[in-house]
């Protein structure tokens, strides 16, 4: 029988912070999962701010999360486009670009896709 472990961590004291042009991701590891809080400033776009780190044509991370503030546009590689706003829950498969719409920063909690997001190669 395995013992249950009670874990509690705060994104206000993250295990790791990854910074990139016009944004950052704060990460905590809990229960074997990595949860991230992404903050994207106005003017942030994945294809210009994170692509140089990822070295892929589009974002290959899947995202399952909750938008706390701001407006985020996402375009899939197939051309499908959606807009997520504060209060929205999103599920974005791999193969997309994303960008901040307007002058308010986007803050979102991602429960799935942040393990390797914007991780610089060693």
Image (cartoon, helix red, strand yellow):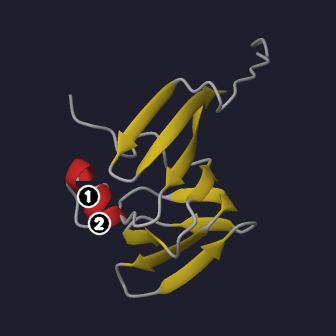
Q: Can residue 108 be seen in this view?
A: yes
Q: Residue, x 53% and y 51% (percent of image)?
A: 39
Coordinates of residue 58 in the picture (x, y in percent):
30, 66
Quadrant into which the N terminus falls? top right
Q: Is residue 32 visible?
A: no
Quadrant position of residue 31: top right
Are dots 1 and 2 in contact, CB under 8 Å? yes
On the picture, is 72 further left or further right than 55?
Answer: right
Quadrant into which the C terminus falls? top left
Q: Residue, x 38% and y 40% (percent of image)?
A: 19
Q: Residues within 10 Å of mark 1 (few under 14, many from 20)?
A: some
Callout 2 secondary element = helix
Coordinates of residue 42 in the picture (x, y in percent):
46, 65
Q: In this view, does 30 lie above or below 97?
A: above
Please tell me the numbered disc located at residue 47: 2
Q: Which of 3 and 77 is in front in this view?
A: 77
Q: Residue, x 75% and y 22% (percent of image)?
A: 8
């Amino acid at each position: 029988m395995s013992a249950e472990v009670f874990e509690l961590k705060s994104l206000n004291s993250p295990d790791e912070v990854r910074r990139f042009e016009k944004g950052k991701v704060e990460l905590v590891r809990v229960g074997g999962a990595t949860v991230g809080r992404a903050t994207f400033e106005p003017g942030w776009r994945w294809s210009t701010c994170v692509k140089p780190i990822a070295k892929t044509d589009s974002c290959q991370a899947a995202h399952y999360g909750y938008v706390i503030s701001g407006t985020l546009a996402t375009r899939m590689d197939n051309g499908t486009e959606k807009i997520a706003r504060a209060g929205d829950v999103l599920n974005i498969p791999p193969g997309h670009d994303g960008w901040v719409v307007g002058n308010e920063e986007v803050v979102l909690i991602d429960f799935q896709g942040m393990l390797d997001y914007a991780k610089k190669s060693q």
